[in-house]
Structure formats: C-alpha cells, structure tokens
C-alpha cells in the first residue's frame, strides 16, 4: 500500500494564512521573480494594491497579474 503524500509545512502555512487566490509578500515576490523588498516598495509607491490593512501583506494573484501585464517584468 502506498502512503498518501502530505504537503510540507510551508505549503500548509501559506494555505492557512492567505485567502484563496492571494499570496503573502514572500510568495508574491517569488511569483513575480523579484525580492520581497521590491514588492514592498511597489506597494508603498502605489504600483501594487494589497488586500486590506492586516498585519500581513496579502496581495491577490489578479493584482499581481495586472501589474505584470502592465509592466512586462
């Protein structure tokens, strides 16, 4: 019998703390291929909109796709 594959801790943490269709700052940076500080600066300058005003920076994938399409990273 083959045991089911379980996700590692990082996948579980991301899934629990970010809404479906959204990524935390570090994951959003990885998605865009840049460093987290770069995404933070883009948010501060108003280029990317974050979801809500929670302690954690959460960005919708649709917002990342919009930014990527407009800026051709």
Image: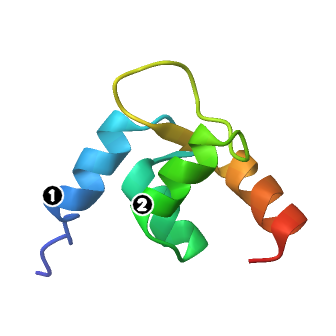
Determine the secondary structure under disc 1.
helix
Which sits in the foreground, 61 or 7?
Answer: 61
Q: Is 6 positioned to the left or the right of 18 in the image?
A: left
What mark, if any, has residue 36 been given in the picture? 2
Q: CA distance from mark 1 to mark 2?
A: 20 Å
Mark 2 element type = helix
Q: Residue at the spot x=83%, y=68% of the render?
A: 71
Residue 7 vs residue 24: left or right? Answer: left
> In the image, what residue occupies the spot 78% across and 57% down?
67
* Point 54% across, 77% down: residue: 33
Q: Earlier in the sequence, mark 1 or mark 2?
A: 1
Label 1 neighbour load within 10 Å: few <14, some 14-19, many 20+: few
Instruction: Give me the residue at 71% from left, 39% from top.
Output: 46
Between 43 and 57, the one lying in front of the other is: 43
In the displayed image of the protein, which residue is found farthest to the right?
Answer: 70
Q: Percent x, y for residue 16?
A: 31, 37
Q: Position of residue 43 (x, y in %)?
A: 60, 43
Among the 4 quarters of the image, the one containing residue 72: bottom right
Q: Which residue is mark 1?
A: 9
Inspect this view and state whether residue 60 appears. no
Quarter of the image with the C terminus in it: bottom right
Which quadrant: the N terminus?
A: bottom left
The x, y position of residue 31, in whole percent, is 54, 68
């Amino acid at each position: 019998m083959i045991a089911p594959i379980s996700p590692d801790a990082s996948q579980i943490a991301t899934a629990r703390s970010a809404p479906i269709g959204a990524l935390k700052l570090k994951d959003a940076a990885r998605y865009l291929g840049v460093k987290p500080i770069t995404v933070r600066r883009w948010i501060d300058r108003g280029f990317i909109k974050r979801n809500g005003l929670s302690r954690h920076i959460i960005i919708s994938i649709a917002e990342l796709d919009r930014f990527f399409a407009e800026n051709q990273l």
